[in-house]
Structures are given as C-alpha cells and as structure tokens.
Image (cartoon, rainbow, N blue to C red):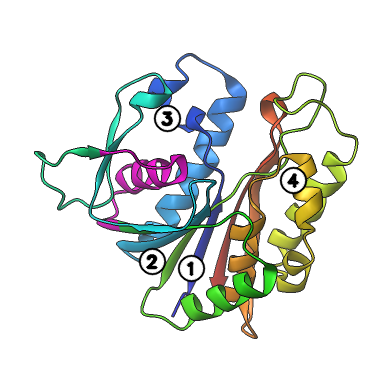
Amino acid sequence: MITRVALVPYPPLLVPELAPGDNRQIAELRYAVLATVRWLRQGATSWRAIAADIGGPGGYAEQRGSFAGYGTSVDITLSKDVSKDAVSAALPLPVLIAGWLREQAGADAVTVDVLDPAMPQPDCERAGAALANGDDTALLVLADGSNRHGAKSPGGNDDRAPEFDASIADALQRADADGLARIDPTLCTKLGAAGRVAWQVAGGVVGAREWHARVHYTAAPFGVCYHVATWEAR
C-alpha cells in the first residue's frame, strides 16, 4: 500500500551537467526536489513512479539510459543492479529524471509507468486506486505545470496560467483528490501543462485515507511552473 508520495517536476535543468552555472532559481528548485526524493527514500528503497509522455504507455525497469539527447552524456540506471555493460536505451525524459533522482537519493530501484497524456480522468483514478492497494509503499509522481507564465515562457504568455497553477498548488497542499479530478484536460493542453494525468492518478491513490500534505516549492522560473510536494498517509 502506498504510504508516501513525492510529487516533483521533471525538467532537464534539474541535472547540473545539463544546466551548469550558479543560478539561484535553478538551485532552489533542485534543492526542493532533492530534499523531497531523499524523504521518499527514508520510507522505501524501491519506488514506483508515474508520468505521462507523448511516446505513449509503457513500463520501464532495470534499464540504463542517457541524457545525451539533451546535450550531455549523463548516464542513469533505474536500478543499482543494472550491469555496467548494459546498453543505454532511448528512454523518455520523465524516465531519465526518475532514474537520476533514484541515484541522487540512494534508492535501490525505481519502476516507471509512462501513461498516455490523453488518458481520461476515470481511468487515471482507477489506476491510482490500483497502485494504492498494490505492494509498493513509495510513489514518485513526475508532473509539470503550465509553460505559459509570461511573454518569455516557452509557450508564450497566457493570463490563465497563474490561476491554473495556483489551483494545482492548492490541491497538492491538501491532497485534494476531488480538486485534482476536476483538472480540465482541454485547458491543460492550451496552457502547456504536462502534469494532468500523473496528478489525477495521484488523486486516485488518496482514496478515503487521511494524508499529511505539504507543498515545498511552487514557482515558474523561466516561464514554466513547477510544484514540489509530499504526501504521507496518517
């Protein structure tokens, strides 16, 4: 049964080799994310992770990958037991970040479920309920907010982005399954928010249990909003 949930973004800039230099905004985001996954590691050495990616559904475990496609050949593994001779696979970005976070936190392994970004909310809720009742105890949720905060943002400015991400932060702060279930897929697409499916699966994990929830970081450096939160079952 899932008892700890860490909710983090997955931008490449989390990896120092991919975004070198002394940038305060990046440093603050990295600190929040790394502190959160180290907290997750305190609860379990093997993790389940969820994310959505345009590459479509798939499961990833016991594999090696590389950030070479993002400019620097930083290798990662999804398990400490992966052979050094294993060939690097072409892994989706959230899987690469999950593997990198596993290594940074010192966890033994992470199994990543990559879901279809178009997955309907009822299916997300059912998937979350199945995870909640499974054998895993620690869940890593990889999800990004809107990329339309300000004129220099990757998606260009959209005045609805601040209110949208404020509502996400509020739902994460309260582990509010109903609030997460109400996230509008069409609005997410318009706002360039990649986190809807993963957040709604996390909402399915909540169920009828009580949770201690806390948001550790919410900001939009470089025009993309990132949320970092933890939930622990009481």
Q: Secondary structure at mark 3?
A: loop
The residue labelled by disc 4 is 189
**Amino acid type indicated by mark 3:** Val
Magenta region's main secondary structure? helix
Name the spot of residue 197 as percent of width and height, x first.
Answer: 62, 59
| Element at label 1 | strand
State how far apart marks 1 and 3 are (Cα). Answer: 24 Å
Question: In the rendered structure, are the residues bearing label 4 and label 3 in contact, judged by CB atoms less than 8 Å apart?
Answer: no
Residue 67's spot in the image, x, y percent?
36, 29
Of callouts 1 and 3, which one flags the residue occurring earlier in the amino acid sequence?
1
Measure how far apart labels 4 and 3 are at the Cα level: 26 Å
Q: Closest to the observer: 171 or 22?
A: 171
In the rendered image, is residue 62 in sight? Answer: yes
Indicate which disc, 4 or 3, sits on the residue closer to the N terminus. Answer: 3
Residue named by callout 2: 43
Sequence-first tag of 2 and 4: 2
Q: In the picture, residue 208 is in which quadrant?
A: bottom right
Query: For residue 52: magenta?
Result: no
Residue type at mark 2? Gly
